Image (spheres, grey):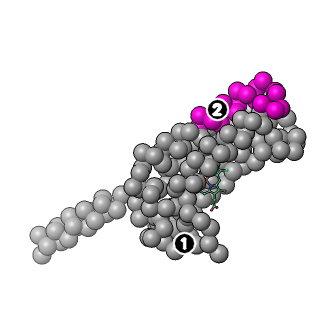
Amino acid sequence: MRILTGTILAAFAVVFLAAGDPATAMSGKETIDKRKAFMKEKILKPYLVAKKFAKNGEGTAADVASAARALSAAAPDITKDYPKGTGRGDFDDKVTRALPKIWEDWAGFQKAAGVLGTEAAKLASVADGGDKDAIAAQFGKTGKMGCGGCHKPFRGAKVK
Ligand code: HEC
């Protein structure tokens, strides 16, 4: 009996250890929600600060510089919450727009995050100079090469 109890306890410990810490025990849906919230809060928000200045002259060049620095710093973390099994094909198209290509070309996905980091850093230094036209031009590049450079190959169409 004592041996049996020991065996059961040992088996229990193995299962418990395999489950790991709570952070890795997040469900796929929770992970998708988390990365989407990150995108809105840490990527879209600073992007919109720069957009408002570049397109409508709202705010200041200094606002753009600090937003662009925050955007550049956050860019490498975009790829953080993409465990295998959380893309289209695994979940309903309404739940995620992440294409399987992300996992087929993981290096390309990470590289795309790096491009955003570089372009946003350039935007920050151009904004330090204060030239509105130069800021608008570099803002355009950041959107096209940074956001578009990843969304085009790696994000699928929106479905209703
Ligand atoms: C390295 C790749 C990558 C880069 C760079 C990138 N995105 Fe995304 N973005 C994605 C992917 C993939 C999704 C879809 C995530 C999902 O649906 O699971 C997404 C989704 C979004 C969403 C929708 C979030 C939601 O709630 O569904 C917004 C908004 C967004 N991105 C804005 C931006 C902006 C603005 C930029 C540039 C400043 C940018 N992204 C750069 C990969 C990227």
| Residue 125 shown left or right of residue 76 in the figure | right
Residue drawn at the location 55% of the way across and 66% of the way down = 96
Disc number for residue 41: none
Which residue is drawn at the image coordinates 73% and 28% (left, top)?
126
Ligand 1, image quadrant it occupies: bottom right
| Residue 4 falls left or right of residue 32 | left
Residue 21 in picture, x, y percent from top left? 40, 56
Main SS, magenta region, reads helix
Task: Assess disc 2: are there few (<14), some (14-19) or many (≥20) residues with their C-alpha within 10 Å of its C-alpha.
Answer: many
Q: Earlier in the sequence, mark 1 or mark 2?
A: 1
- Give the amino acid type for the residue marked by disc 2 in the picture: Ala
Q: Is residue 122 left or right of residue 111?
A: right
**Is there any visible trace of residue 152 in the rendered image?**
yes
- On whether residue 131 falls in the magenta region, the answer is yes
- Which residue position holds label 1? 93
Mark 1 element type: loop
Contact, mark 1 vs mark 2 (Cβ under 8 Å) = no
Q: Residue at x 30, y 60 (%)?
A: 18
x 59%, y 37%: residue: 117
Q: Where are the magenta residues, as a range?
A: 117-134
User: Callout 1, which amino acid?
Assistant: Asp
The residue indicated by pointer 2 is: 121
The outermost residue toward the top is 129
